[in-house]
Amino acid sequence: MSAQAKKPELYVLSETAINIVFGTEIDPEIHKRTKKLMDLLEEAPFEWYLECVPSYTGLTVFYDPIKVLRIMGKRDTPSAYVMEKLREKVREIGETTGEEGERAVVTIPVCYEEAFGLDLSHVATENGLSEEEVIRIHTSGEYLVYMIGFAPGFSFLGGMSQKIATPRRSEPRTKIPAGAVGIAGIQTGVYPLETPGGWQLIGQTPLKMFDPNREQPSLLKSGDTVYFKAITRTEFEAYEEGDM
Amino acid sequence: MSLSILKAGLFTTVQDRGRIGFLQHGVLESGAMDRIALQSANAIVGNHENEAVLEMTMNGPEIKVERDSLIAVTGGGMVPTVNGTAYSLGVPLFVPAESTLAFKPVALGYRAYLAVAGSIDVPVVMNSKSTYVRAGIGGFEGRALQKGDRLHIGKKNKEAMKRFDQIAQKADGGVFAENWGANGSLLDRGQQKIRAFPGTHFKQFTAKSRERFFQQAFTVSTQSDRMGYRLQTEEDAPIERQESFSLLSEPVAFGTVQVPSDGQPIVLMADRQTTGGYPRFAQVAAVDLGRFAQFRPNEQVMFEPITFQEAETLYLKQAQAMRERKIGIALKWKDY
């Protein structure tokens, strides 16, 4: 835990949600605290706990005020009671200096060939690189899943090299295929469903990033480590047929 | 099979309380836009208060009811008709097999809820029967209903069965409506304005904008949907920030008022995305969300300031009022 870690701020988002903010930047230290707090809440949930959503900046906790009402003291309000309980949890993680919990490692195969990497040449030109160099840089990075949001299973990954950072397209595409791998600024990520979007597309994965029938519907979750691996078009097609 | 869709209506979907537990996977909450109407409709027919119903928008569907059914329609925007005769919102209604259930538009409100004793039987996907159309998840095949769809009605619980038997006996094979009903919002008789408290970034907007938000009328844009209500300011007076700043996406809630750089507020509704990157100007008090969800495109809405403490107190009072409504309904059924 870095000594300069800011004092977390807690505030109400709505009558049923409290936001805990650890910082305002994309920072692995903030992520570590967020993840720890989330694990703590999920391992032994309070009676009134519904769910939580991690983001770059911290954690939002959703709760049931009616359940709080049943157990809180007379002088409290549900929000004051929940905030106090969450402050205790925040203090608890502040004191833990131990190792992080186990992190799932997911390797995502990507076909960077022209038919999939529609903006690959643009990303290369923009950064004064060859397409091969862009692929090499993209596949040599280690990425951290900070948050899932925007759409089911859409992951916000941090850790991409500044060397291939590229601004969003000025005109978003109306249709991006499921599995498309994109770049936006220093972020990279995978589109789980066919949606509109403005990220620069550099390839596509045959993996199903989101499947409502899986126990964990989103392939990635906050805190996972991600690697990208280049595959050929033949390998991509073999994946699709379930041969690999 | 029990409900056969003859005409789809403008936008009819299966909705319940919504998905809980999957926001961290980016899966929206969804669920009924007007939760008070959802709970009331279910309470009338004896279902669990958060069971699946049909949410109907503006122009309702036309439905062949294939089996004897106990139904209730709550909310606004339309009233039910059975074989051409109109009935009030909120009344327990016995609909004999082979009847045609349709809806007649009325001037007030936008969304009506049809509960059937036994509830709409669709698969539970991630803890909920709610339809999330954009991702094709839940409800009836993940989409709005179409002509030709046939929906199952589930098995009635004990209470729903008891009520069904009671009203069927009275109806004696015909259409029958009770002479009592329960509909409309709770706790806010005469309340016209929508109450809201300051959001996280409220103070970063100009004093003039902060003041204006609670003084001027906004028009509900025709681009509004289950995801969000887009509001247009009167005579081009946008809600402005003191200085521009950029934010990282953070989780948002039902009723969060975001203001993008064009200064036209967006109120996030049931199908909101899980995280949002625009500044959070205000938060609509939960007690008024059901009423707000009944506003139509092109209607004018005005906001009234409230503190979070007041909003929280009203939220708890509304939950208590709903419990009382349920007890009142149960007593009516026992009155035979």
Image (tube, grey):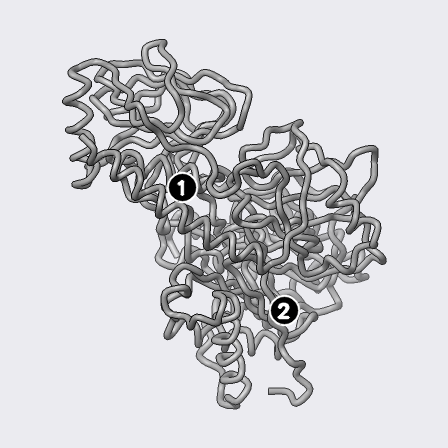
The residue marked by circle 1 belongs to what chain? B
Q: Nearer the viewer, residue B154 or B288?
A: B288
Please name the residue shown 62% across and 67% down the image.
A56
Q: Which residue is mark 1?
A: B130
Q: Percent position (x, y) of residue B137?
A: 42, 42
Q: Could you tell me residue A130's position as x and y percent?
A: 75, 60
Above or below, B142 against A236 in this view is above
Q: Which residue is mark 2?
A: A57
Instruction: Say which quadrant the N terminus of chain A sits in.
Output: bottom right
Cβ atoms under marks 1 and 2 closer than 8 Å: no
Q: Secondary structure at mark 2?
A: loop
Q: Are marks 1 and 2 on the same chain?
A: no
Residue nearer the viewer, B173 or A230: B173
Residue B202 in the image, given as x and y percentages of width and height: 73, 57
Q: Residue at x 55, y 73 (%)?
A: A34
- Horizontally, residue A109 falls left or right of residue B141, namely right
| Depicted B108 relative to depicted B264: above or below | above
Which amino acid type is shown beneath numbered disc 2?
Thr
Instruction: Name the residue rendered at 37%, 38% in the picture.
Output: B40
Disc 2: CA contacts within 10 A as few (<14), some (14-19) or many (>=20): many
- What's the residue at 31%, 21% (across, down)? B4
> What is the count of numbered marks?
2
Whether residue A179 can be seen here = no
Amino acid carrying label 1: it is Ser
Q: Is residue B120 left or right of residue B283?
A: left
Other-residue count near label 1 (Cα within 10 Å), few / some / many at <14 / 14–19 / ≥20: many
| Quadrant position of the C terminus of chain A in the picture | bottom left
Q: x and y percent of residue A43 in the render?
A: 38, 74
Q: Spatial distance from mark 1 to mark 2, Cα to Cα?
A: 30 Å
- Residue A188 in sight from this viewpoint: yes
